[in-house]
Amino acid sequence: MSLRRQIQFWLVSLAAFVFFLWVFSPVLLPFVAGMAVAYLLDPVCDRLEKTGMSRIWATVTILGGFIVVLIFFFLLVLPIVGNQLTGFLDRFPDLVRQLQGLLSRDLIERVAQSAGMTAEDLQSSLTNLIGQGASWIGKLAQSVWSGGQALLSILSLFVITPVVAFYLLLDWDRMVERIDSWLPRDHLDELRRLAREMDRAVAGFVRGQLTVCVILGTFYAVGLGLVGLNFGLLIGMGAGLISFIPFVGASLGFLVSLGVALVQFWPDWPWIVAVGLIFATGQFLEGNILQPKLVGDRTGLHPVTLMFALFAFGYLFGFVGMLIAVPAAAMIGVLARFGLSQYLASPLYTGTRQARTTREE
């Protein structure tokens, strides 16, 4: 098969896969979740097999423990977070008004004068900005919630997702062998090398970043709870949950917690400083210990590229797209680096003169 026919074949296959995601994205969520669970737990299953446990008993043990932890979370942690979320949304307008009231008239006038505006215009702009931000956050939360309904429903959570994860985890090695048998024989070694690079990139980032999110969410929630901040558990877990988006999780969590702390503790500034120190410590731990040790630079993706992938896949495929955004971006990154290396070694880059000189030598 000529190179042109090969390119056409893979482009058509890619288009068919994207079309499949687009058509079936409303029902794919529990299956994608089950696949993600199986992928994350497969190394643990392999380690249990090395100890002498059969594959089926290793799968049952791991998946059973995972379901117990999931039930514990939904029965104990989620109701508390849900109550705090309801209270936060109910009190949000009052919090905004109280926060605006803490801004002194002199401060507003000085800032307005330096910006060439009147105090009334600046205060109106701030009110509109906060209102638009609150509206955007509300729409985002509503979109994520509506997109995650399938995952949170009893059917998908306690039936479909665990069943899919069980069968995929049980047959994972056989599926890998079967897919390996379908690879083109002429490019087998190269395709296997690319697959290993993709696996290292995806597994290293997803498993490492998931651990970072859990550690940071726990740290922020416990720290804010010890300070006595209202909605501390909600803010801390939310900041940890979205910390996989570079700079967004910590920045959003810091701004929200600082606003709540100003309303709650003012003029007791040491407690406000304590809230800031919690996020400063979390950022130090993330940047100097957690990220280098657990994640590193395994995807080879720039933070801006990562954020673009999350927004692009989320826009195209909804909540399912956000789940597959990072793995897909990591795979595309591996293929892009491979394509770049092929281009740099081709006459298209080196030129026909250098290629002819190389052949003559």
Image (spheres, helix red, strand yellow):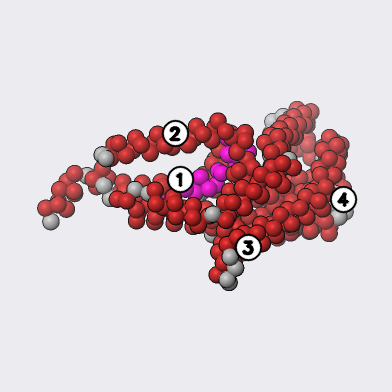
- The segment highlighted magenta reads 316-334
Q: Is residue 324 magenta?
A: yes
Give the residue at the far bottom of this rendering.
Answer: 51
Q: Which residue is mark 4?
A: 265
Where residue 254 appears, x then y in whole percent?
73, 49
Q: Amino acid at mark 2?
A: Ala
- Can residue 311 be seen here? The reply is no
Q: Is residue 133 above or below residue 306?
A: above
Q: Which residue is mark 3?
A: 57
Q: Earlier in the sequence, mark 1 or mark 2?
A: 2
> Which one is nearer the viewer's eye here, 65 or 272?
65
Q: Amino acid at mark 4?
A: Phe
Q: Is residue 115 magenta?
A: no
Residues at discs 2 and 4 in contact (Cβ within 8 Å): no
Marks 1/3: CA–CA distance: 35 Å
Residues at discs 4 and 3 in contact (Cβ within 8 Å): no
Tag 3, which secondary structure?
Answer: helix
Marks 1/2: CA–CA distance: 15 Å
Q: Which residue is mark 2?
A: 15
Residue that appears at 32% across and 51% down = 185
Marks 1/4: CA–CA distance: 48 Å
Give the residue at the far left of this rendering.
Answer: 360
Marks 2/4: CA–CA distance: 55 Å
Give the number of the mark in front: 1 or 2: 2
Q: Earlier in the sequence, mark 2 or mark 4?
A: 2
Q: Is residue 45 above or below residue 311?
A: below
Q: Is residue 217 above or below residue 3?
A: below
Q: Earlier in the sequence, mark 2 or mark 3?
A: 2
> Does 102 sit left or right of 292 as displayed?
right
> Does 15 sit left or right of 257 as displayed?
left
Tag 2, which secondary structure?
Answer: helix
> Which one is nearer the viewer's eye here, 10 or 61?
61
